[in-house]
Image: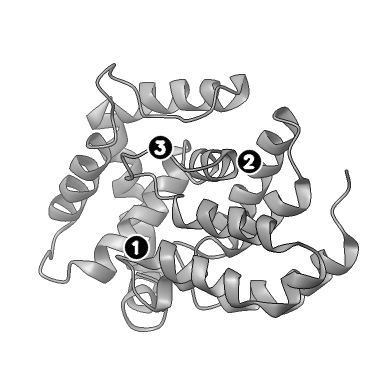
Amino acid sequence: MAINLDLKKYIEEKIFPKYEKYYSHGMLHINNVIKNTLLLAEYYNLDENMAYVIASYHDIGLNVNRETHEYESGKFLDNDSELKKYFNSEQIKIMKEAVEDHRGSRKEEPRNIYGKILSDSDRDFDIEVLAKRQLATSLKNYPELTTFDEHFERCYQYMLKRINTSGKFNLWTNNPIIIEQRNKFETDYLNKEFAKSVYEKEWNRIKNDGTMDKIINYYEDY
């Protein structure tokens, strides 16, 4: 099933611009999530239009409240009357729940399969992308931390909390491509010295090119 072109045009013109002042949750992240969500939608034979919507809307509420952004994003999706042109009320309910359940730190299983594919698609199994996003989030939310070592340690310990009892970063789906990405990421990330070198390289880049100041003072996501 191809994505409805009118729906795609609406999202590209009206939804994506809302991410313009997002850094760690900007379009680089959104496009990665869309790619993975569509991959999983095809694997599980799901509605690609619904998959495209949940990936596109899942972080839209970050400028309202980081701690509850998944619910703010779900509310935004639920209240978008344009979507009613393409989906019935049950489909919108499923998409709203999927967005509400997407956070990687969530311990409870998502309520539906769309929530599962979105949650797994939202995980950054790319250490360089993760370093970019985590450091930005840490800088924005923890101004009391002043050194690279402090920020790295907070980021690293946060990620370790996502490892399940079997020693793996949790996944709700079993797609072999995503599993392979996870396994490579674990090898890289659990080598703490290697992970630290990747984060330090990103820290020096954003410090020297002015990005760090924009993260703190310009971008709106947390």
- Which residue lies under the disc numbered 3? 109
Q: Nearer the viewer, mark 3 or mark 1?
A: 3
In the image, is residue 203 above or below residue 80?
above
**Which sits earlier in the primary sequence, circle 1 or circle 2?**
2
Reply above or below: 119 against 52: above
Q: Nearer the viewer, residue 17 or 46?
A: 46
Which residue is most to the top? 166
Give the secondary structure at mark 2: helix
Q: Secondary structure at mark 3?
A: loop
Residues 175 and 218: in front is: 175
Amino acid found under the numbered disc labelled 3: Glu
Residue highlighted by disc 1: 136
Disc 1 secondary structure class: helix
Residue at label 2?
Answer: 36
- Could you tell me residue 179's position as x and y percent? 52, 22
Across and down, in percent, residue 211 comes to 40, 71
Residue sitting at 59 percent across and 49 percent down? Answer: 33
**Tag 3: Cα neighbours inside 10 Å, few (<14), some, or many (≥20)?**
some
